[in-house]
Amino acid sequence: MRIVALCAIGIAAVLAAPSAACACGTVRDWVAKYDAAPPSGSGRDAALRELAGGCGGYTGRDSDRELLRILAHALDSGLDRASIGRVFGTFRCLMGARDREPYGRLRAAFPDARCPGADALARWRSVIGAGVNLRQGPARAAARVGVLERGQVVEELATEGEWRRVRTWAGETGYVHASLVRPYE
């Protein structure tokens, strides 16, 4: 059920097994599928529509840079703008690639996208460990409710001592030790 929810929501890294796949697998799988599609357009348009539903295996800055390349190419190639815009919005406006050249063109092409502001970015954290346990409470003995992958972006909701209450982009909440996350850059 957890994997189905992630696929429906889309953007979070997989909380069950890292190899669990949504309709398009991981972001890296999808990028390979897009690159392999015939350049005629219909195959790549189909890949864009698929990605607009979200993928697992999202890892913040790394995924954003891969997606930026693809979305800039899709925009330049005249592919379905609605699908490009949905992907841009689904992946929170690719904030991890906002310092890259093609980003400005995408932002200009989709001025109505609800991109996170500075206040939201200040609450974002990047997971710095691999296979970090998301816990039910602020203690190592608390039950595990999920697993966070290196590079995954979470939103900090509260601080309790050396623990951070966070929410994944799939909407799951739990606690992670402060030493395992850092401010999002």
Image (tube, rainbow, N blue to C red):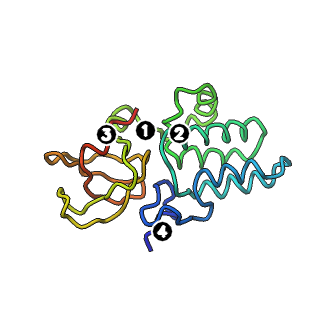
Circle 3 — which element? Answer: helix
Q: Amino acid at mark 4?
A: Ile
**Which residue is label 1 attached to?**
116
Q: Amino acid at mark 2?
A: Leu
Neighbor class of circle 2 (other Cα within 10 Å; few <14, some 14-19, many 20+) is: many
Task: Say which quarter of the image contains residue 71.
Answer: top right
Answer left or right for 77 relative to 161. Answer: right
Quote the CA–CA distance across marks 1 and 3.
Answer: 11 Å
Q: Residue 156: image x %, image y %?
A: 29, 45
Answer left or right for 132 relative to 104. Answer: left
Circle 2 — which element? Answer: helix
Q: Residue 94: which numbered mark, if any? A: 2
Of mark 1 and mark 3, the one earlier in the sequence is 1
Q: Residue 54: image x %, image y %?
A: 56, 56
Task: Name the outermost residue toward the right.
Answer: 40
**Which residue is label 3 attached to?**
123
Circle 1 — which element? Answer: loop
Residue found 72% across the figure and 50% down from its top? 34
Of mark 2 and mark 3, the one earlier in the sequence is 2
Residue found 50% across the figure and 38% down from its top? 61
Answer left or right for 14 relative to 139. Answer: right
